[in-house]
Amino acid sequence: MNWDRPTLTDSGGYQVFSLAKFRKLSDEGVKFQSHHDGSYQFFTPEFVVDIQRAFGTDMMMPLDVCAPYPCSREEAEESVRLTTLWARRSKDQFLKTQSNDRKQFLFSIVQGATHKDLREQSAKELVALDSDAYAVGGVSVGEPVKDMFEALEWTMPFLPENKPRYFMGIGLPDQIVKAVGEGVDMFDTCLPTRMGRHGTAFTKTGRVILKNAENEKSQMPIDDQCQCKVCATYSRAYIRHLLRCKETFGMTLVSYHNLYFYINLMKDIRRAIEEDNYQSFQEEFLRKYRSELVEVK
Amino acid sequence: MNWDRPTLTDSGGYQVFSLAKFRKLSDEGVKFQSHHDGSYQFFTPEFVVDIQRAFGTDMMMPLDVCAPYPCSREEAEESVRLTTLWARRSKDQFLKTQSNDRKQFLFSIVQGATHKDLREQSAKELVALDSDAYAVGGVSVGEPVKDMFEALEWTMPFLPENKPRYFMGIGLPDQIVKAVGEGVDMFDTCLPTRMGRHGTAFTKTGRVILKNAENEKSQMPIDDQCQCKVCATYSRAYIRHLLRCKETFGMTLVSYHNLYFYINLMKDIRRAIEEDNYQSFQEEFLRKYRSELVEVK
């Protein structure tokens, strides 16, 4: 891969939940069938730490249990119980395998589905383990946006402000802006490139669906306020033509614009925080941004 | 498109032959059914000049008739007759529509299939029209490489040395080197990117099939003699992994390497010509390059 900047790797907990054909949980670990080759795999918290040590990952996630949406109270309780048990074993393995060659960091992941008391319990149990950083997990699994933000609000008060707090798998620009307002420091999302491949571009006033007929002859850039090289060079009509012909260059152009948009959104967010101006930045951003409130998986 | 370097556009003659569902020729033009939307289209030589004037193309091709391989003597004769007739009409239209705003150039395209006398006849008829440049067409249509080079050898003696001579749709690196030895100045080919998308890389010693099992754990670059940034950064094993996962980045990396290879091949060719050293360059290149003599369409 030859990537010399920071890397974060997920543990497989979410992937086993969302991609594998079969998942059998026990205190020891999780058995599942690979969607790649049908092979059976057994992951333990220790193995997942070891493999991320081998990768040389900077930010490591422990194996967790992501409950589905919707799920029963019992399933949510069990996901919290196993996630805490495994977080403890992950931390032990992490301490046992520390080296001076490379400093790595181990997160822990709060679960608890859409239950306020379970979110609190999970957060407190994990904070007692003194992780390097904390993630809010079990979100972006199909629940309404309102439930996702409730899970965040129920969790954040119990996570220490002096350590990174990470909202996993989020999200759309307005969701990021709101979550930063709740104290979140870190995000991950595939949306800039996935939406880019499908021809949807982000702007400060909302999304542009490039394939729409209204763009057929538009000589406008994707966003006339944008400084990126795609907006400086190509018209909506040309990009729409590429997308309709399934020329991969069209997907590349929209993805490039979207990454530029997200990177600049995060720069704007950092600047507003530094200038102690976040509340008015957030209000202004949300006023201009027309979220379609579409659930994007 | 916003491309500020030279552009060449084909006339549609070859595309109608190879892509359309239906083709009906008359002295007036060609009727065909679009493979995009099933619509019926009628192209005349005058329309094809006009549309390339509108594009602002630097190098324009006239509408020609590309005979299939194999074809009857009668089909070959008819393709020469119509191609000459249309070349004349194209030239008339080209002269009528000349503007001082933008200098454009009109080629003509030699046909004649695999018949020596027809190649000579076609070339002489077109040279009499005093085109800006000449193309050898009706090649790369499924014929054996030997026949393709015979068509070239039968044509080149009748094309003026002081005008560009263009071998259409060629080709593999060793074919380009041989054709330059015959006096060809220009080529067009999709092979660097098409082969790149399929995971085949070009080197001075032949092709590398990256998906082959032998590359599974290879820490070598595609080509350890290559100075491109792909070869400086990524191993064969990593690129093979990307290709097998159908990550488009893998196709991008191999395409990048292949374009670098072709651009440098053409630089080497120009240098050898300038140093009046082409014969020994060609022998040395062909000695090292293991052509698989595979017909690549």
Image: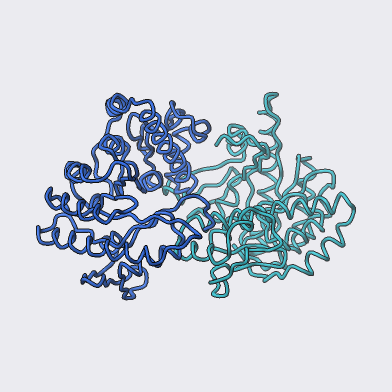
Chain colours: A blue, B cyan
Q: Where is residue B41 shown, x and y percent of the image?
A: 49, 44
Total label count? 0
Q: Residue A64's quadrant in the figure? A: bottom left
Q: Where is residue A171 shown, x and y percent of the image?
A: 31, 43
Q: Kindly identify the residue that appears in the image at 42 percent across and 44 percent down.
A: A244
Q: Quick one: B290 or A123, which is closer to the camera?
A: A123
Q: Residue furthest right?
A: B276
Q: Where is residue A211 shown, x and y percent of the image?
A: 37, 39
Q: Residue B103's quadrant in the figure? A: top right
In this rendering, position of residue B163 left or right of residue A39: right
Please tell me whether residue A44 is drawn above or below residue B57 in the rendered image. Answer: below
Q: Quick one: B112 or B61, which is closer to the camera?
A: B61
Q: Where is residue A228 shown, x and y percent of the image?
A: 49, 33
Q: Residue furthest left?
A: A73
Please tell me whether residue B247 is drawn above or below residue A185 in the rendered image. Answer: below
Q: Kindly identify the residue that appears in the image at 61 percent across and 56 percent down.
A: B230
In this rendering, position of residue A31 left or right of residue B18: left
Q: Kindly identify the residue that appears in the image at 20 percent across and 42 percent down.
A: A157
Q: Quick one: A221 or A100, which is closer to the camera?
A: A100
Please tell me whether residue B275 is drawn above or below residue A257 in the rendered image. Answer: below
